[in-house]
Image: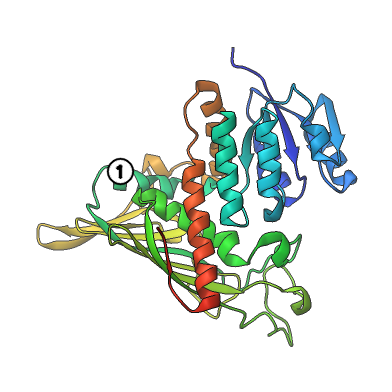
Amino acid sequence: MKKMHRVAIIGCGGIANNKHMPNLKRVENVEMVAFCDIIKERAERACKAYGSADAKVYTDYKELLKDETIDIVHVCTPNREHSFITIDALEAGKDVYCEKPMAKTVPEAEAMLEAAKRTGKTLTIGYNNRQNQDVQYVKKACAAGELGDIYYAKALALRRRAVPTWGVFMDKEEQGGGPLIDIGTHALDMTLWAMDNYSPKMVMGTKYKKLFDKVEGGSGNAWGEWDPETFEVEDSAFGFIVMENGATINLEASWALNMVDCQEATMILCGDKAGADNLNATGRLNGVKHGMQYTENTGAKAGVAFFDADDSDSVYRDIQQWIDALDSGVAPCVLPEQALVVTKILAAIYESSETGKPVYFN
């Protein structure tokens, strides 16, 4: 019999309702026993929809952490709150799944990692796109050495007009930034993971607020009109990253950009043996065989077993592997050490964009 895990949800907003709670409910040895939100009604609704018979509602997460029967905490708050809630939960003896990005700043992320090491509890970060089937295919090809030395990559999180107009996404104090820290973080995490390269050397970055006030006659935004007065973050950002081994990564992120061919949660990898990408949510390999160029489109034909399944379950697979890791005592897919590197690179892009100078890592 597997241990029945008693899980607490801190932050009962959109990410908890759309990602965490529905998929935790599908895991057989999980019960959600505590729900906390600064808006009590949100916690009450979550408790009614997903809670166990003995589930409790809180508005103060510190009171929740006093419950010694809780063994897992999912932190689903705005970025500003990730670090101190995670650290408090770890110190209270809980294993923690914290939403991406790891933290708003590098010192906060470093403190989270230190707390996990000091307490001996398990910490993971919510980079669930690693579980997408196309990403898994590219990762396996890289791990098998099929690409050889991967020396150039692009990490893409480009939206044409899809600014999130709910919650605090456009609040710089709460989130720390816009599309770079929101969706660019996913693309960068996937790319570093596929390359298995976590040693940045230098970063140059730029960010822009060019379209945030271009709303006369309508913005064309997928999620309704945004308010330029509350749009405090960038609408696009770009990074040029050089790794210690000489590899180069271009990171591109936008919520609003005048372009047609948009890609999100996408990477392009170029090695000296072959290349790979997951453009249009399909894993592909390319190279030269027998003196001729080839492109292997793994999702092009029906009956390819790896792509037959509906990929909408990638979030569930992420939650399930997290619980399985705790059950088996192995490390979860996303290590906090890896997530810290993502945060360091994002912070360097923001710093470089402000100073106009490159940022070097020790």
Which sits in the foreground, 337 or 145?
A: 337
Secondary element at tag 1: helix
Q: Residue at x 67, y 77 (%)?
A: 220
Other-residue count near label 1 (Cα within 10 Å), few / some / many at <14 / 14–19 / ≥20: some
**How many numbered discs, if any?**
1
Q: Residue 285 placed where, x, y %? A: 29, 55
In the displayed structure, 182 sits above or below 102; it is below
Q: Indicate left or right for 340 with 35 as reference.
A: left
Q: Indicate left or right for 141 with 122 as reference.
A: left
Can residue 48 be seen in this snapshot? Answer: yes
Which sits in the foreground, 184 or 69?
A: 69
Which sits in the foreground, 117 or 26?
A: 117
Which sits in the foreground, 227 or 86?
A: 86
In the displayed structure, 60 sits above or below 169; it is above
Q: Residue at x 80, y 39 (%)?
A: 61
Residue wearing tag 1: 143
Q: Residue at x 63, y 28 (%)?
A: 27
Residue that protrudes farthest toward the right in the picture = 41
Instruction: Please state which amino acid type lies under the numbered disc 1.
Output: Ala
